[in-house]
Amino acid sequence: MRARSRTLMPVLVSVLLFSVTASGQQPNAGGDTSPFDPRDFSGYWIRNGPRPWGHPPLTRAGMGAMRGRLPDYLATRSSDSNDPMYRCNPQAFPRLVWEENEPLEIVHAGDRILQLFQWERTLRELWLDGRELPSGENLENLGPAWYGHSVAEWQGDTLVVMTTGVDPRAWLDVYGNPMSFDARFEERYRRIDVDTIEGQLTINDPANYTAPWTHAPSLFERMPTEHVSYFGWDGLFSGVTDAICAPMNESEFNDIIRDPGIFGITEQ
């Protein structure tokens, strides 16, 4: 979890505990027999699953990149960890999508699909207009981005997203593993019923790892509208859900939320 204001905590805790249009193209594989459009991902979703764990052996460069990193599981308390996100730096891709169970809205916008995130009040653009994934000089000219540069295409009813150019200053995961600027990430999303999208991530970073690897599938479950409605306002960015990491809130959040939750430490 990350820094939020004190008033935000009860709302997000209730959300974490717990306007898809049906077009009649495919029956639901689950208990609800309502028809749905397998290419319509619009709506509010939340990933339901554990954090991914494990990767192929590190290369020599990968081992070098790990030196000096102090993730949570090696720290006494979060203020000791040098995880960049604990200093209100962007959590970045792929962590925000594939590591955290955070509310997400998906919006179809013509030649692109938008992923809107409650945390950081940020977005990803998944381009469907046929542009190529940047590489070589083109990628160098674009430069690093916290959420990379992404292109997408439909392969049948599976949305395939390719991303590269993620800022290597961000950590790949909570364990402090590295990623290179030209690492490539493949995401595959498939809507399997009215309320569920199945997703899977494959990582190919030969600079840091001896082989590509694929995470176990994750499920993104549709959130009821009432779980994203606050005092008459609907949406992930409404009211107390303005979940931006502000440095002025970070120390208080560590004291009352993160340290007790992760390490069992409370301030005396």
Image: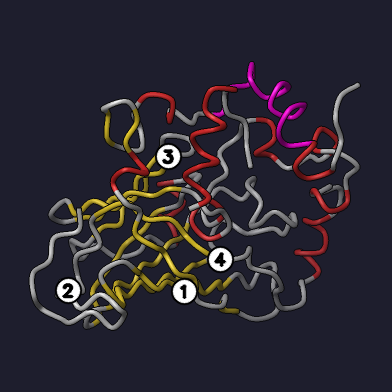
> Disc 1 and disc 3: Cα gap in Å?
21 Å
Residue drawn at x 63%, y 57% is: 172
| Residue 16 percent across, percent down from the top left | 51, 48
Residue at image location 21% in from the left, 62% down from the top: 128
State yes or no: residue 171 in magenta: no
From the image, state whether disc 3 or disc 2 is nearer to you: 2
Which labelled disc corresponds to residue 200? 1
Q: How far apart are marks 2 and 4 (CA)?
A: 25 Å
Q: Nearer the viewer, mark 4 or mark 1?
A: 4
- Residue at 81% from the left image edge and 40% from the top image edge: 81
Residue density around tag 4, few if under 14, some if 14–19, many if 20 or more, within 10 Å? some
Q: What element carries label 1?
A: strand
SS at circle 4: loop
Say few, some or many: other residues with alpha carbon within 10 Å of mark 3 (under 14 / 14 to 19 / 20 or more): many
Alpha carbon distance from label 3 to label 4: 18 Å
| Residue at the disc numbered 2 | 34
Q: What residue type is labelled 4?
A: Gly
What is the C-alpha distance between the residues marked 3 and 2? 28 Å
**At label 1, which amino acid type do we have?**
Gln
Q: Where is residue 212 in the image (x, y as percent from the top left)?
A: 60, 79
Range of residues picked out in magenta: 245-259
Mark 2 or mark 1: which comes first in sequence? 2
Earlier in the chain: of badge 3 and badge 2, it is: 2
Identify the residue position indicated by label 3 in the image: 118
Quadrant including the N terminus:
top right
The disc labelled 2 sits on which kind of residue? Ser
